[in-house]
Amino acid sequence: MNSTINLYLVLLISLLSGNLLSAQEIISTTENAETAEVEPKAPTTGTTFKVDGVAAVVGEFVILDSDIQQAIESLKQQKVEAEALTECKVLDKLMEDKLYAHHAVVDSITISEDQVRSYTQQQIDYFLNQFGGSEERVLKFYRKEKMSDLQKELLELNRNQELAKAMQQKIVEDVEVTPEEIRDYFKGLERDGLPQFGVELEISKILIEPEVPQAEKQKVIDELNGYRKDIVENGSSFATKAVLWSEDESSRGDGGLIKDVDRKSQFVKEFRDVAFSLEEGEVSKPFETEFGYHIIKVEKIRGQKIDLRHILRIPKVTTAAENEAKDKIEKIKKRIEEGELTFAEAAKEFSDEKETASDGGIMINPVTQDRMFELKNLPPDLYPKVQNLKEGEISIAFNNPTRTGKTRYEIYTVSDRLEEHEADFALDYVKIKEFTLQAKRIKAIEKWQNEKIAETYIKLNGTRKDCEYSSNWLKK
């Protein structure tokens, strides 16, 4: 199995999932079983689906011919090489995705509904931006009648993508490597030719957020108390008020509804604590999280999970507060440049980003968990800010607003710089360890795939059986 190519395609398809608008319907063998060529032992749920154009079935998931074509078109837009765009290769990867998602459901793996909704809204915002803000053009391109239809389909797809990702993480969560395995892996690299590493930077940052005036906070609290009073005392609809007033774009269209929340869901602690303190039908008083102020209504309690609605209001930052924050970061920059204090000292004392402030502002690479970032792989929003900085030089102050548009001012410095070089065991130990771990994880995933394919219901229709797959989907 060409594992590197396989994992690359899985990752790529996952990243492009906003464009892969597939029909995520569940199998039913109660109707049209012969037409769909579904064997009698296929799982049943009682849900029907349109059988025309079924390419494959994996567990309880259906892949349509149209899913394959849409995936190919999306990959073409991203300039993926033509050899990776055959129907057989794309179907191969889609089946892998469904295999992960199916067994995630079987193993009762939970995902964050809030995270799924947030990502879905980001995708929709991206689509609108690509089409000049025109909903009509977006709907025409994705062949939908309403934006709500597009959102629902994306939500379902993203849920399954998150399930697949969670399943992969579970497969490899206990995989570790020993120092001997790392050394053996490096010896293999030496035999095959050591790789070249590009320019790498250690980057530090200081972030200053404008202070929200207390009057603005109180205004939002009063608004939420007004909504709550109207709901509790006058019987007004929480859902309607969420549609009209909530600033959580990911749930506003559904009346603030968030389903299947449990104590492990990836909400901030304050949100979970309030949600699970309420009785069914109860509406909370306003409370604060890092996102703003909320009120919550518990719609349904189902064992360890709840369905809830919430309204989010975000206090507005005044122009005066923004100017004050910008002036503050400019003064901090000047003090560092004049030698009054170091960048690390300034970050610890002044930075509003808790994750980096305690470490003197040093950023951690989320991919490698190392302090070094390869210049060519920097995120697009960070690259232009640091690409030309010399070691110890400080950037200009940038406004890097949050997803909700809240102003944040940042300055950066390059605290260490490694020029392009051939892999060195001591110098690049962290990266070599990560390569070794990834290779071992790939083997673990291959083993899991082989075992699960053997025990999972899988059906390929028509000419789909003639493909050469990287995995044994035909169970030969």
Image (tube, helix red, strand yellow):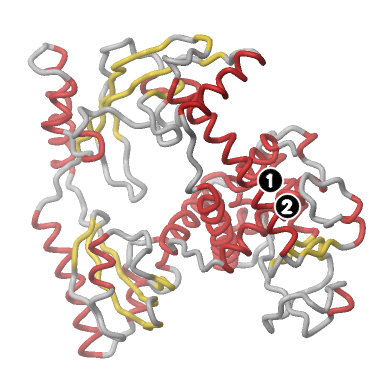
Mark 2 Cα within 10 Å, few/some/many (few <14, many 20+)? some
Q: Nearer the viewer, residue 246 or 367?
A: 367
Q: Is residue 96 above or below residue 396?
A: below
Q: Residue at x 43, y 57 (%)?
A: 115
Q: Quadrant of residue 346?
A: top left
Q: Is residue 418 above or below residue 239?
A: above
Do the numbered discs 1 and 2 sit on residues whose CB atoms are within 8 Å? yes
Amino acid type at circle 2 is: Gln
Secondary structure under tag 1 reads helix
Q: Nearer the viewer, residue 177 or 389?
A: 177
Question: Residue beneath label 1, please?
Answer: 74
The percent position of residue 240, horizontal first and vertical second, equals: 37, 78
Residue 288, labelled with which disc? Answer: none
The percent position of residue 284, horizontal first and vertical second, equals: 22, 76
Q: Residue at x 12, y 36 (%)?
A: 324
Question: Residue beneath label 2, please?
Answer: 70
Q: Residue at x 32, y 36 (%)?
A: 400
Secondary structure under tag 2 reads helix
The percent position of residue 149, horizontal first and vertical second, equals: 59, 67
Asked if residue 118 lies left or right of residue 234, the reply is right
Mark 1 Cα within 10 Å, few/some/many (few <14, many 20+)? some
Quarter of the image with the N terminus in it:
top right
Q: Is residue 37 above or below residue 380?
A: below
Rounded to the nearest angstrom, the CA distance separating label 1 from label 2 is 6 Å
